[in-house]
Image (cartoon, rainbow, N blue to C red):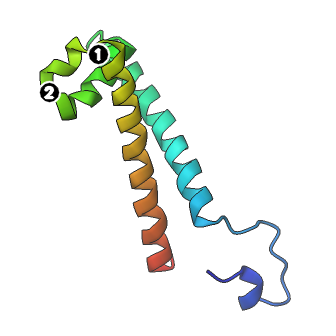
Amino acid sequence: MQNATTHFPNQTNSFPTPRAFEAIVYGGLAVGVLDILDAITFFGWYRQMTAVGVLQSVAGGLYGREAFNGGAKTAVLGLCLHFLNATLFATAFTYSVDFCQC
């Protein structure tokens, strides 16, 4: 990826261009935190689910209904799966923007 000063040599770039790894990590964290807070808030209000129940429902993608019998272990697994998914989406977005030169 080229620096902005390469295209416009008379202008200084006051904001450094983020590297792909940093964009993916920070993007994954931001998306993961905001999305899980939204899910816990919405399903807590709409379906009266606890935070553990929401995280267990994420783990239910692997274990099915048995995830709700797993306690804290499946809740932690659900949290890990959630952040893995968020990081994969941040990776796809980062590389697609790089590919499109948007």
Q: Residues within 10 Å of mark 1 (few under 14, many from 20)?
A: few
Residue 94 against residue 42 in the figure, above or below: below
Mark 2 or 1, closer to the camera = 2
Residue 54's spot in the image, x, y percent?
Answer: 32, 21
Q: Residue at x 25, y 15 (%)?
A: 70
At x 43% / y 39%, what residue is drawn? Answer: 83
As displayed, is residue 88 above or below residue 58?
Answer: below
Give the spatial CA distance, label 2 vs label 1.
22 Å
**x 39%, y 16%: residue:** 51
The answer to whether residue 12 is above or below residue 60 is below
Q: Is residue 26 left or right of residue 96?
A: right
Q: Amino acid at mark 1?
A: Tyr
Q: Tag 1, which secondary structure?
A: helix
The numbered mark, 2 or 1, whose residue comes first in the sequence reads: 1
Count of marks, rendered view:
2
Q: Quadrant of residue 10?
A: bottom right
Q: Identify the disc placed on residue 46.
A: 1
For mark 2, what is the residue? 64
Q: Quadrant of residue 16?
A: bottom right
**Residue 87 badge:** none
Foreground of the two, 34 or 80: 80
Residue at point 36% right, 45% down? 85
Callout 2: helix, strand or loop?
Answer: helix
Q: Are marks 2 and 1 in contact (CB under 8 Å)?
A: no
Q: Nearer the viewer, residue 10 or 30?
A: 30
Left/right of residue 45 with respect to residue 95 in the rendered view: left
Q: Amino acid at mark 2?
A: Gly
Q: Position of residue 1 (x, y in %)?
A: 61, 80
- Residue 26 at x, y = what percent? 59, 49
Q: Is residue 28 left or right of residue 47?
A: right
Q: Position of residue 73 (x, y in %)?
A: 34, 19
Task: Using the image, determine if residue 30 lies above or below residue 45.
Answer: below
